[in-house]
Amino acid sequence: MRKIRKAVFPIGGLGTRFLPATKSMPKEMLTVVDRPLIQYAVDEAREAGIEQFIFVTSRGKSLIDDHFDHAFELEETMTRRGKSLSILDSTRSSPGDITIVRQQEPLGLGHAVWCARRIVGDEPFAVLLPDDLMVGRPGCLKQMVDAYAELGGNLICAEEVAPEDTSKYGIITPGESLGSITEVLGLVEKPAPEAAPSNLGVIGRYILQPEVMDILASQEEGAGGEIQLTDALAQLIGQQRFHGVTFSGRRYDCGDKSGFITATLALALERPELAPAIRAFMATA
Ligand code: G1P
């Protein structure tokens, strides 16, 4: 079985839910404690063995490229002042690690993934949506890569969502379940609660076979008038193995203000140097 070496990060979205913060700054650079959202996703991917990081971006996202570059003036000054550069370690990518692909038009998640087809080539790959901040040990993608070594095929991260929220997620028709693995018999993007086959939602982590790119090439618009990854994946069911993996850890939906603030508080409370002051404030709030 081929190792999962490449990961696609679809990060072309406008981030209108966070305006005005995201007027000139990519939403993936919004910071939870002291790391931007994109760095959490990149760190998670690196832990899972990813070697090539494919950012599918759009205009106005170049701050993200800079974040993962060397910063000569900063590093030079820190070194002169005797400061350790280790805090920058996971942001100092090596030549060729990161590939930037432009998504010229905002046509949907499926289209964004398809934009990376030439870089992905004919090997299985991961997709990570940085809006879903996954906290766990090992990380979410590592747990999925471990499951992939047993199962192969296509894997999506699966989590039960509130039944009234099915219209925010891809929803799974579940088959047999064993431990954290559930067979996927069907997928539908953002169904109304009354039409949803279950409340088992797709969370933003995928391990996919390259054939999905051929399907995406002719995928028609789906929910919201967008080319949906979920619709392309639904066509693979029955042709290739397909499972959901329940992540052992916590998810914060950072595409939403309350989820983002919750993530900030939760991760700050895990820092010994920050927790006492925050706890003291919360007790008075
Ligand atoms: C995307 C996918 C959806 C998935 C969700 C997870 O939706 O289309 O299937 O459940 O991510 O976060 P979006 O949140 O981009 O609307």
Image (spheres, rainbow, N blue to C red):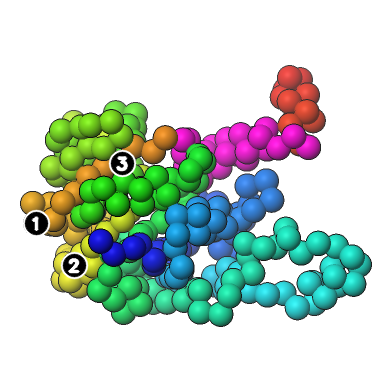
Disc 1 marks a residue whose amino acid type is: Gln
Give me the C-alpha separation between circle 2 and circle 1.
10 Å
Q: Position of residue 210 (x, y in %)?
A: 23, 67
Q: Is residue 134 magenta?
A: no
Q: Position of residue 157 (x, y in %)?
A: 33, 44
- 10 Å crowding of disc 1: few (<14), some (14-19), many (20+): few
Q: Based on the displayed image, in which of its 4 quarters is residue 77 positioned?
A: bottom right
The answer to whether the residue bearing label 1 lies less than 8 angstroms from the nearest atom of ligand 1 is no
Q: Based on the displayed image, in which of its 4 quarters is residue 275 positioned?
A: top right
Instruction: Pick whichever, 30 or 157, lies toward us.
Output: 157
**Could you tell whether 148 is left or right of 187 in the image?**
right
- The residue wearing badge 1 is 239
Disc 2 marks a residue whose amino acid type is: Glu
Magenta segment, which residues?
Answer: 249-273
Instruction: Pick whichever, 253 or 214, lies toward us.
Output: 214
- The residue wearing badge 2 is 211
Q: Are marks 2 and 1 in contact (CB under 8 Å)?
A: yes
Disc nearer the start of the sequence (3/1):
1
Q: Is residue 252 magenta?
A: yes
Confirm whether residue 131 shows in the render: yes
